[in-house]
Amino acid sequence: MIKYSATIASGGTESMPYLFKGNIIESIETCAKNGFDAVELHLRKAQDIDRVLVKEICDKNSIAVSTIGTGMGYTFDRLYLTNSDESKRKDAIERLKEHIDLASFFKCAVIIGSMRGRLPDAGETESALKNYRESLMALAHYAEKRDVTLLIEPVNRYESNFHNTSIEMRDFLKSLGSSKLKMLLDTFHMNIEEFGKTGMYDSIRECREVLGHMHFADSNRKRPGAGHIDFAGILKTLNDIGYDKYIALECLPWPEPEHASIDGLRYIKSLGNGG
Ligand code: LER
Ligand code: MN
């Protein structure tokens, strides 16, 4: 059965698509009260939270941690895996290893989206891709030993300039051949990058073997139902392929966090299995 998660962050700017920003403990309690099965924790650093306390609060409120989001490591600290500067690339790998350790504690998965980085606009593309591939393999080996899944996310062309589509990402992940490397599909990015009218559905079908997580946001990055993405069609496709993992609402807290989370969840649930 599909489970629902809400994005919560220890900080972040207004434009970041996390439902709740600020006090993690209060956010967990609110998400549990409002019917979410889990929270997706977006952290700049693994050390930003008291993991024992967070686990205690989750257990007390019967809510899980589905995933750890790492994008703030890129936004605030410019840490990324395609970096040609070896020492900075190592810092990015170390930061992600700390997230993997935290995920092993919560028995959840780690997202690598923005921290993939970009390829240089001219020259050095091959070496940046090589750095990226090697970094990801090192992280996959680290994650395999800790039984943690890494969710690699295609993001749209305005945020990165490689592996923007699901098929490119699927083929790349298959070429790496680690059972702990899975793909995260985000409807906001898919709406920009996938091909044709049925592109989003076809992509989900084509990627079913590697699909490990979903982010739901509407075309305007507001909660599902606030834009023009056909979530009934997406839910139907997910049900057709037997998807039984998490859907996390990674969307703007518009008009305010509680309204957005309650309304977004109610809207998706009202669509059932998409008909
Ligand atoms: C960024 O746009 C995004 O969708 C995040 O999930 C990536 O870390
Ligand atoms: Mn996302």
Image: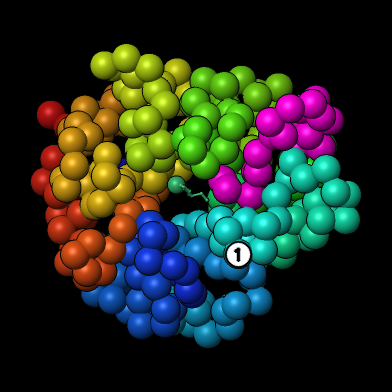
Q: For this view, does 247 lie left or right of residue 176? A: left
Which residue position holds label 1?
76
Relative depth, front residue between 211 and 252:
252
- For label 1, being within 8 Å of ligand 1 is answered no
Pick the quarter of the image with the C terminus. Answer: top left
Type of residue at label 1? Phe
Q: Residue at x 74, y 27 (%)?
A: 122
Q: Residue at x 22, y 69 (%)?
A: 256
Is residue 256 covered in magenta? no
Image vertical order of residue 10 relative to residue 35, above or below: below
Q: Which of the 4 quarters of the picture holds residue 47?
A: bottom right
Q: For this view, does 99 lie left or right of residue 25? A: right
Q: Which of the 4 quarters of the picture holds residue 189?
A: top left
Q: Residue at x 25, y 51 (%)?
A: 222
- Where is residue 129? Give x, y as percent: 76, 30
Q: For this view, does 146 lie left or right of residue 184? A: right
Q: Which region shows up in magenta?
A: 113-132
Image vertical order of residue 232 relative to residue 199, above or below: below
Relative depth, front residue between 204 and 187:
187
- Where is residue 117? Give x, y as percent: 65, 43
Q: Residues within 10 Å of mark 1 (few under 14, many from 20)?
A: few
